[in-house]
């Protein structure tokens, strides 16, 4: 039984089908990729999974339980957390207070006697930002602010974390370190669903990848399978042209 299952989900915005009959799943201790060109419907899928967007059709299941009608905060209690494509942090607060807010919210419903301050320190340490925890987030470089958002999501002690382009704004060495952190978190049992345009990062960390194009899943497979899938190569450049397909294959293997 997968931790998360998306069952035949469609989302219509007027004339646009942002998602069309999407089936996907994600498991604990695994990093599952969700990739696709701009506008493919990745963020919409995250919104459906976390409860910010009602699907036009289909269901979302957590531990085999239908959560499609549950509000976002109820889903959070079941173990879903996310980060946002457009970084959402409290800029005027310190990194520590950003994380503490989440740890305190969790304390209200978790009833496991955890001390929010201790939880906050632990996750700050976990993502490696203890040394800047007192700084205001709006004074931080993007890479650091993204780590604050990640720490805040982890403070809710999720079982499945949805990451929407966490690599954007990170330089090469930050991305390298970030990939290592995601792999460590997976080894500790956290499930992750990763939306990311940095194909190298996706190929390095994911166990299984789902590819969306124009709202539909066009391929599912291991990184190697996805790299060699001609439909995926075509979707990435929107190309039938074999030269373009070669170029796309190159991008997918080592962009
Ligand atoms: N609230 C909305 N109202 C109307 N159309 C929307 C809405 N949200 C998304 N769309 C449309 O749905 C489609 C999918 O958008 P979505 O943001 O899910 O794509 P994405 O894969 O996350 O893209 P990107 O890689 O650029 O972030 C696009 O055509 C987009 O314009
Ligand atoms: Mg998006």
Image (spheres, helix red, strand yellow):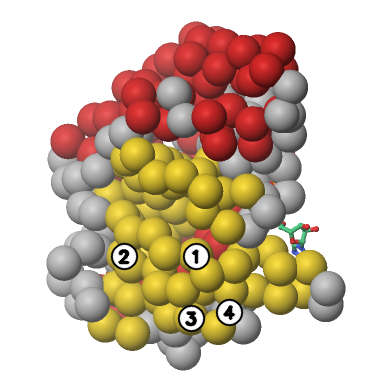
Q: What element carries label 3?
A: strand
Q: Which mark is residue 22?
A: 1
Q: Is residue 134 shown above or below 211?
A: above
Q: Camera-side residue: 84 or 4? A: 4
Q: Residues within 10 Å of mark 4 (few under 14, many from 20)?
A: many
Q: Which mark is residue 55?
A: 4
Quadrant of res 63 = bottom left
Looking at the picture, how far across and down is residue 155, in whole percent? 36, 54
Q: Is mark 2 on a helix, strand or loop?
A: strand
- Tell me: 9 left or right of 14: left
Asked whether the beta carbons under mark 3 and mark 1 sit within 8 Å of each other, the answer is: yes
Q: Name the residue under label 3.
A: 58
> Looking at the image, in which quadrant does ligand 1 appear?
bottom right
Q: Residues within 10 Å of mark 3 (few under 14, many from 20)?
A: some
Quarter of the image that includes the N terminus: bottom left
Q: How far apart are marks 3 and 4 (CA)?
A: 6 Å
Q: What element carries label 4?
A: loop
């Amino acid at each position: 039984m997968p931790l998360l299952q998306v069952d035949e989900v469609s989302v219509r915005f007027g004339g646009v089908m942002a998602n069309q009959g999407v089936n996907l799943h994600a498991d604990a201790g695994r990093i599952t990729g969700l990739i696709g060109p701009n506008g493919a419907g990745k963020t919409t899928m995250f919104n459906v999974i976390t409860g910010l967007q009602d699907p036009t059709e289909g269901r979302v299941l957590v531990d085999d339980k239908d959560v499609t009608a549950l509000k976002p905060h109820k889903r959070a209690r079941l173990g879903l957390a996310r980060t946002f494509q457009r970084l959402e942090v409290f800029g005027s607060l310190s990194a520590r207070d950003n994380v503490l807010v989440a740890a305190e919210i969790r304390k209200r419903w978790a009833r496991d006697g955890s001390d929010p301050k201790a939880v906050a320190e632990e996750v700050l340490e976990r993502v490696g930002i203890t040394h800047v925890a007192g700084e205001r987030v709006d004074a931080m470089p993007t890479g650091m602010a993204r780590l604050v958002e990640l720490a805040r999501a982890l403070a809710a002690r999720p079982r499945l974390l949805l990451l929407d382009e966490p690599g954007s704004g990170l330089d090469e060495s930050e991305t390298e370190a970030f990939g290592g952190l995601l792999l460590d978190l997976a080894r500790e049992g956290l499930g992750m669903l990763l939306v990311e345009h940095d194909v190298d990062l996706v190929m390095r960390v994911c166990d299984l990848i789902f590819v969306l194009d124009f709202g539909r899943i066009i391929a599912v497979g291991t990184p190697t399978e996805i790299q060699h899938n001609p439909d995926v190569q075509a979707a990435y450049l929107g190309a039938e042209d074999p030269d373009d397909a070669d170029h796309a294959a190159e991008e997918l293997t080592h962009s």
